[in-house]
Amino acid sequence: MDAATVLEQYTQDLSNLPSELAHLLEELRYKDMSLYQIRKRAQGKDNQLHKYIKQHGSLVKHPKEQQLYSKINEDFTKAKALQEEKILLSNTALLLISKHLVRLESDIEKLESEGLIAPDDMIDEDKNMSDGMSSLTPVPPSQSSTPGVIPKKRQRNGASRTQSKFESPPLSASAPTRTHRKKNASELNQTGEEDELYCFCQQVSFGDMIACDNPDCKYEWFHYDCVGLTAQPPSGIWYCPDCKNDQSVRKRDRKKKKVEA
């Protein structure tokens, strides 16, 4: 195996990736538009009820109140289903990219270990790849329009208004600690703060969670499904896809491996 062979094979394997990602992004855009219409429709019904209360007082029941609430609940159910579909599409796009990056990383390490390329030769290429990948990180599913900056940890404030109910599916929340690499949401019920958001999907902790070994990781903990892991945690050091593409993390990992060797 040489660098030219790796490049040729990798280029060939990537030939279908742009069209696959374009299809997934188009599906996300379509679901965003559908979600916007659902939110608009539900908000209109909610405004109708509030307007009637302002005009007639809270003691006078709207003649179609039960029907309106029923329709609003139907919209909530549809919105939740759309959010879950968006999460699935985002994770699919992430896994498509991660699969190629993991294989490329493995091939590069083999070439370096065989002395066919020098580690410094890859710095510029890796930096460009890392910058490009940062724009492909899935947006939080609670966002239905233009994504914004997501803080490392964020708490959601409870609200009674209709619009707030669309922000994310109701999941039991628990905040993991970094005591173990793998945690189950049921084991974390007694630790941390409620409603902490984690992972690329920016959801609360649930199911099996794994911690990134990069102490500076902005997401820190990840759901197994979101990073394509099975029931068993990986052996040794594990980095999330974002940190794996970070040049400083790669260089630190190489130095650690050399010291251990």
Image (cartoon, rainbow, N blue to C red):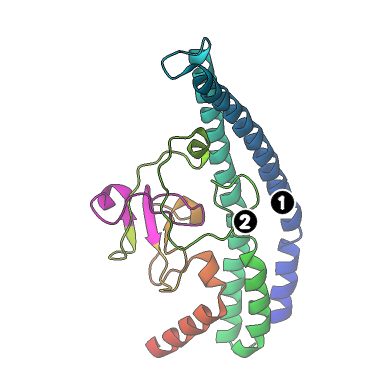
Residue that appears at 70% across and 39% down? 30
| Residue 61 x/y as whole percent | 46, 13
As drawn, which residue projects farthest toward the left?
190
18 or 83: nearer the viewer: 83
| Residue 43 x/y as whole percent | 58, 30
Q: Which residues are magenta?
A: 183-210
Q: Quadrant of the C terminus?
A: bottom left
Q: Is residue 232 visible?
A: no
Residue that appears at 62% across and 54% down? 147
Q: Is residue 185 magenta?
A: yes
Q: Quadrant of residue 123?
A: bottom right
Amino acid carrying mark 1 in the image? Glu
Residue that appears at 53% across and 40% down? 84
Mark 2 closeness class: few <14, some 14–19, many ≥20 residues within 10 Å: some
Secondary structure beneath dot 2 equals: helix
Mark 1 closeness class: few <14, some 14–19, many ≥20 residues within 10 Å: few
In three-dimensional space, the C-alpha distance between marks 2 and 1, rounded to whole angstroms, equals: 9 Å
Amino acid carrying mark 2 in the image? Leu
Q: Is residue 148 visible?
A: yes
Magenta span main SS: loop
| Residue 168 x/y as whole percent | 49, 42
Residue at label 1? 20
Tags 2 and 1 touching, CB below 8 Å: yes
Residue at label 2? 96
